[in-house]
Amino acid sequence: MRQQLKPLAFSLSLLGIMSLPVFAQADNISSGNMDTISHRENQLENRLSQVQQELRSIKKQLKNNQQQVSYSNNKNTAKQQQPHLIVNNEAQETKQEEAAQSTGSSITGPQNLPEIGSQYIGTDVDAPGQSFVTTGPYIGVPVSYAGNNLIINSPSINEDVSLLKLRKNIRARLRKLGIPVVSDHAHLLLSGIIEGQIAYKNPGVGPTTSDVDLTSAGLDAYVLGPSSWLSGLMEFAYDNDLGTNSGSFNNNSRNQNSRVFINKAFVVIGNFEKSPFYGTIGQMYVPFGTYSSSMVSSPLTKLIARTKDRALLVGFQQQGDDALYGSAYVFKGDSYTGSTRSINNGGVNVGYSFVSGKYSGNFGGGAIANLADSQGMQNTGGTPLFNGFGGTNGTGNEQLAHRVPAMNVRGIFSIGDSWDFIAEYVGAVKSFSRADLTYNTHGAEPQALNVEGAYTFTVFTKPTSLTLDYGKTKDALALGVPLERFGVTLNTSLWKDSLESLEFRHDINYAASSVATGSGIMAPSASGKSDNVVTAQIDMYF
């Protein structure tokens, strides 16, 4: 750069010397040539101005090169930088460049930003790798090659707790790497899933069916900050239902549907580095049950009781291997009694997790004020007959004779990295009114049980798991679930951040003599036969 400045300085000196004879002879020149002289003077002044501008540009480029060299020499040290770089005019830009140079900032970018108005460049110098938007592990799904944890899939329950633990882990890793953690910086973590499935079904009644389907596609945006106490999640999901089933399109083609919608969005206030207490508000799956499973198919407990709504939640989560946890939540349910709607549903969830040598576990229970707000009761998929309390075209009715509370008991117990046992029960604690939900002419009292055992081993260095499953329901014919279920699933991870599964499922349906209604409308009749389903599935996480 100095070699480039020397010719420039020499040129400026030469121009100064050349201008002396011109001004010395000015008194002896006739007035007729004054215009020509003035024109030459203007040319020289313009040229001098251009040279000065080039000099300023070279100086600015020199500062940028020094800034990059400073970053290269100090890239392993902490950076001190304001959250936003504001450019209003050339003078302010120069001051900021000098400040950035003196602090060793790692922020570089275009030098020809507009000089009209304020221009903002969002930054987060605490992000690993100096990246402000990154991809991370899919929330709730463990990283591959993790032994037994690989196959225990989280069904989006207590996701706020998982996010707070994730953030605590990120900050701990930054400190371990020697990177200071600044609380007023924000970071966006993107994660998601793409899931494909091939299924073959041999029903007890009717012809066999087969399908190739994109069963899941989702993108989670987890915002960390800008405060260490504030974070949030927004999930964009893909809908593979038929348009006529979901109500978004009046067309039977699922390809023409394939809509993208906001599945979950909530704000979390909490910091597990400083307090075990937290609060969440937004659209989420409330913590009634956990529904953990190693199967491809959803457990019967989840099909009946998992509940998503727009809720307010407060909870606590002790830190460490042995920890108590609990939460309470309220929301305005879709179903209601009386003539007005208000906040009419809620529940509690408590549990205890522990690690003792090679043994670990998580046990808990909970209660909800009204089971009728669960997804399985709001939409049974039984159109044009009873299609759940939220069914359209007269297939359902949200106004109930009375609310039906429910309870949940669950447990997960692991022995080393090889054995995992899961058991969960959900059930109503009183019967529905015969005007709302029935089974064999009496008010239904739906219940469900799921029990699993999984053994994890290694095949050619790849973690593999074999799972046996048993499920049972009671008084749930109107909800479109079988009476009993037997299943076996083989899971493995051939590639990093992927899961490959093969499942065989045997469903025993309710007896053909059974009848059920919902909202006074007949439910699809039971076959009394058994269904056999084979499913192959591949999941890719990022």
Image (cartoon, rainbow, N blue to C red):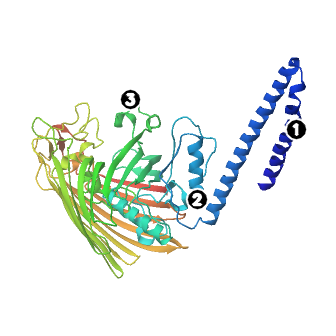
The kind of secondary structure element at disc 2 is helix
Q: Quadrant of residue 231?
A: bottom left
Q: Is residue 314 above or below residue 384?
A: below
- Please say if the residues under marks 2 and 1 sit with CB atoms less than 8 Å apart: no
Image location of residue 160, percent across then percent down: 33, 57
- Name the disc covering residue 250, or none: 3
| Of pointers 1 and 3, the one earlier in the residue sequence | 1
Q: Residue at x 45, y 72 (%)?
A: 147
Q: Could you tell me which residue is drawn at 86 percent across and 18 percent down?
A: 31
Mark 3: which secondary structure?
Answer: loop
Kind of residue sitting beneath label 2: Ser
Q: Nearer the viewer, residue 480 or 235?
A: 235
Residue 436: mark in rendering = none
Looking at the rendered structure, the number of numbered marks drawn on it comes to 3
Seen as rendered, the residue at the extreme bottom is 357
Where does residue 464 sit, x and y in percent of width and height? Answer: 47, 69
The quarter of the picture where the N terminus appears is bottom right
Q: What residue is shown with label 2?
A: 102
| Residue that mark 1 sits on | 18
Q: Is residue 375 left or right of residue 244?
A: left
Q: Residues within 10 Å of mark 1 (few under 14, many from 20)?
A: few
Q: Please name the residue shown 89% across and 23% down the image.
A: 29
The kind of residue on which mark 1 rests is Met
Which amino acid does the dot numbered 3 rest on? Asn
Local secondary structure at mark 1: helix
